[in-house]
Amino acid sequence: MSTKTNPGRFFEDFRIGETIRHATPRTVTVGDASLYTALYGARFAVQSSDAFAQKIGYPKSPIDDLLVFHIVFGKTVPDISLNAVANLGYADGRFLKPVYAGDTLSTVSEVIGLKENSNGKTGTVYVRSTGSNQRGETVIAYVRWVMVRKRDESAPPPGDKVPELPKAVEPSALGAACPPIDPAKWDDALAGSPHRFEDYAVGEKIDHVDGMTVEEAEHQIATRLYQNTAKVHFDAFSAKDTRFGKRLIYGGQAISLARALSFNGLGNAFHVAAINGGRHTAPLFAGNTVYAWSEILAAAELPGRADVGALRIRTVATKDKPCADFPLRVGDEPDPAVILDFDYWALVPR
Amino acid sequence: MSTKTNPGRFFEDFRIGETIRHATPRTVTVGDASLYTALYGARFAVQSSDAFAQKIGYPKSPIDDLLVFHIVFGKTVPDISLNAVANLGYADGRFLKPVYAGDTLSTVSEVIGLKENSNGKTGTVYVRSTGSNQRGETVIAYVRWVMVRKRDESAPPPGDKVPELPKAVEPSALGAACPPIDPAKWDDALAGSPHRFEDYAVGEKIDHVDGMTVEEAEHQIATRLYQNTAKVHFDAFSAKDTRFGKRLIYGGQAISLARALSFNGLGNAFHVAAINGGRHTAPLFAGNTVYAWSEILAAAELPGRADVGALRIRTVATKDKPCADFPLRVGDEPDPAVILDFDYWALVPR
Amino acid sequence: MSTKTNPGRFFEDFRIGETIRHATPRTVTVGDASLYTALYGARFAVQSSDAFAQKIGYPKSPIDDLLVFHIVFGKTVPDISLNAVANLGYADGRFLKPVYAGDTLSTVSEVIGLKENSNGKTGTVYVRSTGSNQRGETVIAYVRWVMVRKRDESAPPPGDKVPELPKAVEPSALGAACPPIDPAKWDDALAGSPHRFEDYAVGEKIDHVDGMTVEEAEHQIATRLYQNTAKVHFDAFSAKDTRFGKRLIYGGQAISLARALSFNGLGNAFHVAAINGGRHTAPLFAGNTVYAWSEILAAAELPGRADVGALRIRTVATKDKPCADFPLRVGDEPDPAVILDFDYWALVPR
């Protein structure tokens, strides 16, 4: 193999405390926002309309939080997960500054944990990735952990530390990416929902009703938009010889589809303020139809803010299984139709 | 079902005279314009080139008229046609102000007619929908009628009125969305056609020659771009149990494809000034190839305008049937290959 | 056939020395740039990030060179190659000015050669096409030659001249579209490669490793974005009766995919300065997976420039065949898996 190409890092190539600056800074534009709408059908008014956003207090429509997440995430793939076996989880994801069209995003990751698996063939790499804008301000930070192959099974473990991670982001840490808004100027009819923060009850479950079928062209276009290069998503020829026999869809596609579907029931939950955790519990393939349901896990006031409250939401997405009865488990086993179990905080006007 | 989700209105939920403000205002951008070009291959010079548009008198390229129509239409779906059996027709569509990148569109509908069907299970709802920009100026107004299911067949008819609708928009009402242009600065070579208003004869038929095959990913991307949520377009899993057994393509996709194909023969018909009527006469599915032909129904000068004239055009689109012999009927029956019969006014430089 | 539609030119319709102004000027926007990223996954930092581009000396990110090429090329199709049997080659392609979002491109072609084939049924047409911006500045010029059918086999040859074309653009003619840059401000980590101009050796071969599968929706969206109307790319119904029995993918799709894949190994080769030649050696179809490898053919300093050097690169793309062993020939025959043999100059910081 040429020394010019990137073979990706193997487990033994990581070191705890190491900082990795990722390639390909990206100026986000209204073109990206249009594609995001076209790929998922997002309908949240703040991200859709400059006029709506300005009326409540934004300078203009912010870029969708998950589009920011996907772009920041995509940059980490060539350095972190090119030789990954599985993307295991997310934690402590915080949105810290709004991103607007014209901002340039780049990503740095710090290795915060390493744990070799008992089989000696793989290990788990924990990284905290930080996305910054062109002024050097952090716009998002999150932790993810992936299982990565070793190049050489006889190599000694490069480290042995499992970081302590919060089960959920504290409410006091929420809201940095949301300017003060004027809830009196929030037009429920234009927003598409009469339900404000106070109208949601902890324990309430919502079936988001609608389904969305994913095509190969769609997830490829999405994943390339994020400059995510993981080959499992794009190469049908090589995929024939994998355990699935076909291309695997980027997990973020399920997150964005579930979030877009959740508009039907959570129309005023306009801003993803934090990602508490998330697991891709089963693979998603082209031809599958994604459905979703949510449960309100908690509701929190934000210190010093009377304009918005935070709902902690668990959104579960399925494939080829409508969610009227909130599928999650079948007896003692996870329901194999469940593809995503996602735990996040969303802001809702009061 | 959660009370938080939108079940859509049923026939008995509408009232004559009622006004419905629809959700999700939308700032239209150059990103949307790029996607529109990429989805249909539109080639009209005014909408493609700022330089061309400015030379003849526009401040810059306007957003394609049909993109405006689709966005304004899309907003009405959750309130008007979520429980629709069929989209029956359009009338009295008028383009009243140009829309430019950066403008924000929102939609209001007035219920102008209700007519229960004799079976007592469904009724026809007539709405006049009005799209406005961020300054509150009306940019488009049109009437459509849809057949909507009753929730409760025993409910009394909510009204009984069929509105009178014009067969065609009057020429005196055309042109409001087209600034005065300088036809001497219209470059036929750049526009792609030497044929001006005077070169078209009433009764002339034009086969637009080319065909365009539609893929599932394409119509889904288009329909989501318009934030149109009608589930029949997106959910292959549920569609298996419908009468078609598969996803149905949004009717507007056929309109935009036919309009883009019509460039070959109508290259100078740069502005859709009015929609007189339109019917989706058969369903369109992914894998079908769309062809189109047009007939010039009328030609009209516009009061006080020497720059442009109006052609009333009937454009017929087919699936999997080239249009060299202008397919429309087979004996006494409609030709089953015809999917769209569309009647509109277009402006052409003189 | 209506006299209003464009039947395309046949071989006997061309004249040596004739100039053809093509239709549909096009304002290129950030929306087009987003789609380009989404369609190919390009990751070159200069085109991806305004901040990166500004730091080294550009006013902002330029539009990708190949996006410019495809848009300029697309305009020539209705006049040059609507009745083409095959696109035979390219030569003497030079990028002469950077193109930025907001610029409007239009194309003029001069017929520089005509050669009837011995069968009397077809002939080769050589055109030099020139793309200009809204200020009339030439941004790109290139020669291509296509085999075009005669309408009337008994028509006399319209000319008989094969132009002399350079095998490669001279290094002294390179760099006009690249402003002076400051290589000290070029951040290798952000760019994704530590390899500068001096690190590449003539004769070096690089397998670009990754593969990308092409879907029908993707190549149709791309080709329409370029307003390229060649019907072989879009009409599955008519294609059933062709020799391939299906839609044929625009050759430029292979060029852009190969270029995007080549980032893995040529990450700092940020600007396509010239196209020396290119042949589409076999057809590409939806469902195929594209791979690529490159060889460094030459390295040249640019007169008066210490900031960048030029690498002459041969990039070979294949379908359904990974390129670890640099496929090109099988015995004495061309390898049927090879779809593209592309020879270009790229600029690399020193």
Image (cartoon, coloured by chain):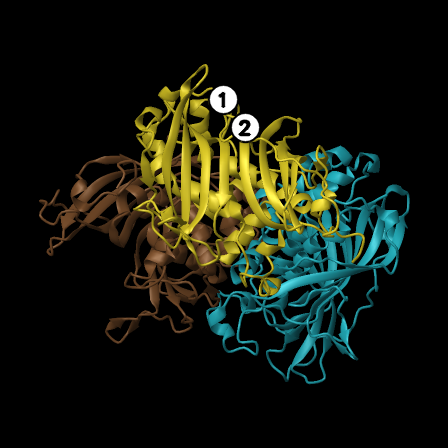
Chain colours: A cyan, B yellow, C brown
Q: Which residue is mark 1?
A: B179
Looking at the image, the residue that sits furthest to the top is B304
User: Which label is found at residue B98?
Assistant: 2
Mark 1 lies on a secondary structure that is loop
Q: Residue at x 48, y 38 (%)?
A: C100
Query: Looking at the picture, does residue C103 appear above or below residue C174?
Result: above
In the image, taking residue C305 as reference, residue A82 lies left or right, namely right
Which residue occupies 71% across, 61% down?
A292
Residue C218 placed where, x, y %? 47, 56
Residue at x-position 30% and y-position 27%: B199
Tell me, yes or no, if residue C23 can be seen here.
no
In front of the other: B116 or C58 = B116
Q: Is residue B198 left or right of residue A333?
A: left
Q: Is residue B125 left or right of residue B2?
A: left
The reply to whether the C-beta atoms of the residues labelled 1 and 2 are less than 8 Å apart is: yes
| Image location of residue C117, percent across then percent down | 13, 54
**Percent position (x, y) of residue A184?**
83, 35
- Report, in whole angstroms, how far the alpha carbon at label 1 lies from the one at label 2: 8 Å
Outermost residue toward the front in this view? B118
Chain under numbered label 2: B
In the rendered image, the quadrant that contains the C terminus of chain A is top right
- Chain of the residue under the numbered disc 1 shown in the image: B
Tell me the quarter of the picture where residue B52 sits.
Answer: top left
Q: For residue A140, which numbered disc appears in the image? A: none
Helix, strand or loop at label 2? It is loop
* Horizontal and vertical percent position of residue C330: 29, 75
Could you tell me the amino acid type at mark 2? Pro
Q: Earlier in the sequence, mark 1 or mark 2?
A: 2
